[in-house]
Image (tube, rainbow, N blue to C red):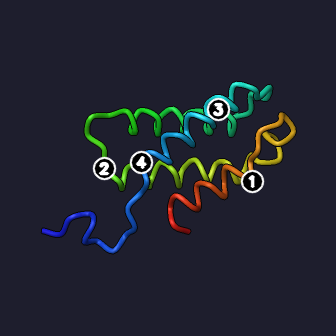
Amino acid sequence: MASEKDSGAPEVNLEAAARLIAALEQDLKKLSGDSRDIQRLKDEVETLKNVLNSPVRRDHWVTEGLHGVRDVFERVKDEVVADGVKGGQYIAEIGRILGL
């Protein structure tokens, strides 16, 4: 059976992902909008935070969570930038963590 390290997918820097999610969580508190997409972004961040805090962490769970956050961020970046959240920086950092 192949391990995740043998699968060819790059390993995710879990510490970098945790720092990013902590910073993003703080920035999301600034958002004044309550659209469905912003709520989904908050939900994705909360889910990923729970995965990162779980005693059983799997790189692929973190990878999927980061992709989910990135996808939603792409849809709401204009809305969150208006509230001072650095959308482009978060998207770029997620891409760096994922090796994109």
Q: Earlier in the sequence, mark 2 or mark 1?
A: 2
Crowd class of label 4 (few under 14; some 14 to 19; many from 20; radius 10 Å): some
Q: 53 or 47: nearer the eye? A: 53
Q: Residue at x 69, y 25 (%)?
A: 29
Q: 19 left or right of 4?
A: right
Q: CA–CA distance between discs 1 and 4? A: 21 Å
In this rendering, the label closer to the viewer, 1 or 4: 4
- Report which residue position mark 4 lands on: 14
Q: CA–CA distance between discs 2 and 1? A: 26 Å
In this rendering, the label closer to the viewer, 2 or 3: 2
Crowd class of label 2 (few under 14; some 14 to 19; many from 20; radius 10 Å): some
- Report which residue position mark 2 lands on: 58
Position in image of residue 52 (x %, y %)? 40, 39
- Report which residue position mark 3 lands on: 39
Please tell me the numbered disc located at residue 53: none
Q: Quadrant of the N terminus?
A: bottom left
**Which amino acid type is shown beneath numbered disc 1?**
Gly
SS category of the residue bearing label 2 = loop
Position in image of residue 73 (x %, y %)? 67, 48
Q: CA–CA distance between discs 3 and 1? A: 19 Å
- Report which residue position mark 1 lands on: 88
Q: Residue at x 55, y 39 (%)?
A: 21
Q: Earlier in the sequence, mark 4 or mark 2?
A: 4
**Which amino acid type is shown beneath numbered disc 4?**
Leu
Q: Residue at x 66, y 54 (%)?
A: 91
Q: CA–CA distance between discs 3 and 4? A: 24 Å
Q: CA–CA distance between discs 2 and 3? A: 25 Å
Tell me the quarter of the picture where residue 35 sits. Answer: top right
Q: 79 left or right of 18?
A: right
